Image (cartoon, helix red, strand yellow):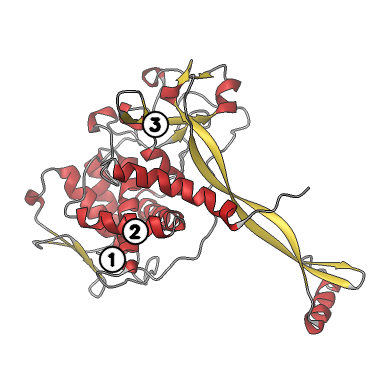
Amino acid sequence: MVKRFTPADRMAPYERAAQAVLDAIRRGVDPWRPSWSAAVNINVPFVPVNALTGRQYRGVNRIVLSFAAFDDGDDVKICMAGGDPRFCTFNQATGRGWRIKKGAKGFPVFFYKRRESTLAIDDPGEVDEARLAADRGDDSFVIEGEEVFRKRSIPILKTYTVFHASQIDGIPAIEDVIVPALGWASVEAAEQIAAASGVPVIHGSTQAAYVPALDKALMPAKHSFSSAADYYTTLIHELGHATGHPSRLARMFGMPGTTDYAREELRAEMASFMLCGEIGLNGKIEDHASYIDHYLKLLENDPRELFRASKDAQEIADWLYERAFGQRLDLVFDYGVRTDDNERVMIDVADIDGYQLALL
């Protein structure tokens, strides 16, 4: 018997992902601020990776796993705060002779799997056009006697469960794994990203902002920030907004106080979080506490907002990174263990139509 998916079934994965982020925010975790010490990972990309393939988790999976936490009986602890970014599935772990610790609860990673189906065409004119197209070799139609069907490919959101290295017995200690240094300091990398973006940066403003009409990023003086990391994290946030300019990724910006504005802030903060984790910056963006309520409302009202925002944020981060370093963010880093078939469980979310967006 074919299982029929109800609307509730289809929404469940979105709700599960959004709930992970909502729970973290309600626990008091500062959204989009790295939870690990800067001393843990100097000059090394500190983002969630698969322990066997070495591939980075991208999009919504990077966000969800960065927030992944477990209750050790005394407190709720964020997995990556201990300095180990590795995750893997149950089958990957057992295949290497490792064991998942008793009582360990895994974390979801999400991907789209396309389901093929057909839709009957009833309009006589469309039926005739479809038959002619099929005769010309168009394979997007199925002809069965008098009936004509159009092929459809429907993206279905699926989940895997992964476990953090701290939940796995037998996995090599992170100290024993050779992790490649990237060859640049975090501040130097941030400077290179800013220069390659082509966005003019004007200092002396009373607050950080991106002005679309001028295509300029406004920043307070560097000495007004508590650390270099805070300065560059904030700058990368504003450069994230700047990617929405028509000459770049061409997003629409909304007005302050609107839902669209909150969406754009969510995108830019996610993008800054992703990119700063990549280059080892452990800074925070000042004066953004007021947006927390907006994030909560967005995700509570529609869990799919997390997927839309993280997809756009990944695109923003990729755009900035590619121009600075000539490559995408989904590099493979050898964390010491690899399967023969390079099993990949971090699959990018499918394209989802965006909204008209906002900024600052």
Q: Nearer the viewer, residue 258 or 125?
A: 258
Q: Which residue is mark 3?
A: 85
Amino acid at pointer 1 = Leu
2 or 3: tag closer to the N-terminus: 3
Of pointers 2 and 1, the one earlier in the residue sequence: 2
Provide the residue designation for mark 1: 359
Cα–Cα gap, marks 2 and 3 = 29 Å
Left or right, residue 291 beside residue 168: left
What residue is drawn where x is 39% and y is 71%? 356
In the rendered structure, which amino acid carries the disc numbered 2? Lys
Quarter placement of the C terminus: bottom left
- How crowded pointer 1 is (Cα within 10 Å; few <14, some 14-19, many 20+) is rated as many
Residue for badge 2: 297
Instruction: Give the class, few, some or many, for how many residues have Cα within 10 Å of label 3's Cα (few <14, many ≥20).
Output: many
Q: Nearer the viewer, residue 35 or 291?
A: 291
Q: Kindly identify which numbered label has been placed on residue 325.
A: none
The quadrant where residue 357 appears = bottom left
Q: Dots 2 and 1: beta carbons under 8 Å?
A: no
Closer to us: mark 2 or mark 3?
A: 2
Residue depicted at 29% across the width and 51% down the height: 193
Q: Is residue 109 left or right of residue 300?
A: right
Q: Considering depth in this image, is 59 or 15 the residue closer to the camera?
A: 15
Residue 245 x %, y %: 33, 69
Name which residue type carries label 3.
Pro
Task: Determine the CA span between mark 2 and mark 1.
Answer: 17 Å
- Disc 3 is placed on an element classified as loop
Q: CA distance from mark 1 to mark 3?
A: 31 Å
